[in-house]
Image: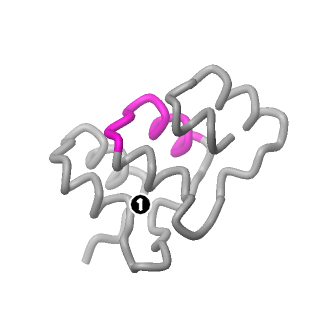
Amino acid sequence: LYVACYRGYAEMAKLLIQNGANIELLGDMNLLINACKKGDLEIVKILVENNVNVNYQNSRGFTAIFHTCLIGNIEIAKILIKKGLYYK
């Protein structure tokens, strides 16, 4: 799943998730954080639709919204906020 998300293979990611792949990979390999770093809207949508933790912090304390703000992607920010992002 990590490779499918990293490469932006949305249909493969969907297939793997539907068949039980773990969307909560932790540490610096977090799927949502990596998708946000790349600005991959489609992968972010897939992960959020499958209830990924939008508030996860990696080992350095960075979150998906941090990386979203770094690249200035408003659409991804809206998705994260709508899903229940804690951004205090």
Mark 1 secondary-structure assignment: loop
Name the spot of residue 51 as percent of width and height, x first: 60, 51
Q: In which quarter of the image is the C terminus?
A: bottom left
**Residue at figure coordinates x 63%, y 20% from the top left:** 11
Decide if residue 47 is on the left or right side of residue 34: right
Relative vertical location of residue 47 with respect to residue 28 in this rendering, above or below: above
- Report the amino acid beneath label 1: Gly
32 and 46: which is toward the camera: 32
State the colouring used for the structure image.
one colour
Q: Quadrant of residue 41?
A: top left
> Most extreme residue toward the top, as rendered?
11
Decide if residue 67 is on the left or right side of residue 58: left
Residue 26 magenta-drawn?
Answer: no
Q: Give the range drawn in magenta.
A: 38-49
**Residue at figure coordinates x 41%, y 79% from the top left:** 60
Q: Quadrant of residue 35?
A: top left
Residue identifier under label 1: 84
Name the spot of residue 34 as percent of width and height, x first: 45, 50
Relative vertical location of residue 11 with respect to residue 28 in this rendering, above or below: above
51 and 26: which is toward the camera: 26
> Most extreme residue toward the right, as rendered?
19
Name the spot of residue 84 as percent of width and height, x first: 41, 60
Relative vertical location of residue 85 with respect to residue 8 in this rendering, above or below: below
**Residue at figure coordinates x 44%, y 56% from the top left:** 33
